[in-house]
Amino acid sequence: MIIKATPDKEKVKSMLNLINDREESLSLAGIEKFPTIVSEGYYEIIKELALALLLLDGLKVIGEKAHKELVDYLSNYKEISKEEIVLIDDLRIKRNKSFYEGKPIEKSYLENKKDKLLNVIKKLRSLVHAKL
């Protein structure tokens, strides 16, 4: 459920610092050896950037389907294409299967999607910075 919240630029700045740390740690992990961990890391970065956008819009998500609603909310931004929303949602599903069921994410998935995921991260970061 999406509810109203008080926009908090300081919290968003803190979130951006954590995102930077995540990105740095992912660069050390490597796709070859840890594709599941890197994929989960990309998901967390995208999720945190989307949460930052929501917070800057004066909103937050709560409840059982919060992550799905968060992904769907990104369609409100013309900069994020429908194809990118589908990509993010697919990563969300793969991350959940990995996280909750122990199913690994194949290296080939990440090799095929990495550039698109990095582009989504770049777009989301740009949107967040534009609102700060």
Image (cartoon, grey):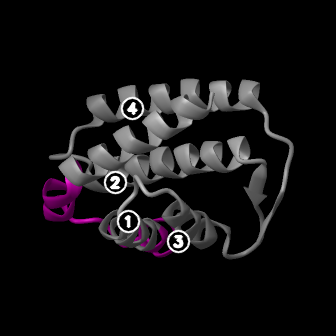
| Amino acid type, residue under disc 3 in the picture | Tyr
Asked if marks 2 and 4 touch (Cβ < 8 Å), the reply is: no
**Image quarter hosting the C terminus:** top right
Asked if marks 4 and 3 touch (Cβ < 8 Å), the reply is: no
Give residue 81's position: percent from left, percent from top.
35, 63
Mark 2 highlights which residue?
Answer: 39
Would you call the spot at circle 2 few (<14 residues within 10 Å), some (14-19), or many (20 or more)? many
Labels 1 and 4: the sequence-earlier one: 4
Residue range corresponding to the magenta coloring: 96-114
Report, in whole angstroms, how far the alpha carbon at label 2 lies from the one at label 4: 11 Å
On screen, 83 above or below 110? below
Report, in whole angstroms, how far the alpha carbon at label 4 lies from the one at label 3: 23 Å
Mark 1 highlights which residue?
Answer: 91
Which residue is at the front of the view, 116 or 34? 116
Q: Secondary structure at mark 3?
A: helix
Q: Which of the 4 image quadrants contains residue 8?
A: top right
- Mark on residue 100? 3
Rendered residue at 32%/56% (across/down): 36
Magenta span: helix, strand or loop, mainly?
helix
Report, in whole angstroms, how far the alpha carbon at label 2 lies from the one at label 1: 8 Å
On screen, 30 above or below 79? above
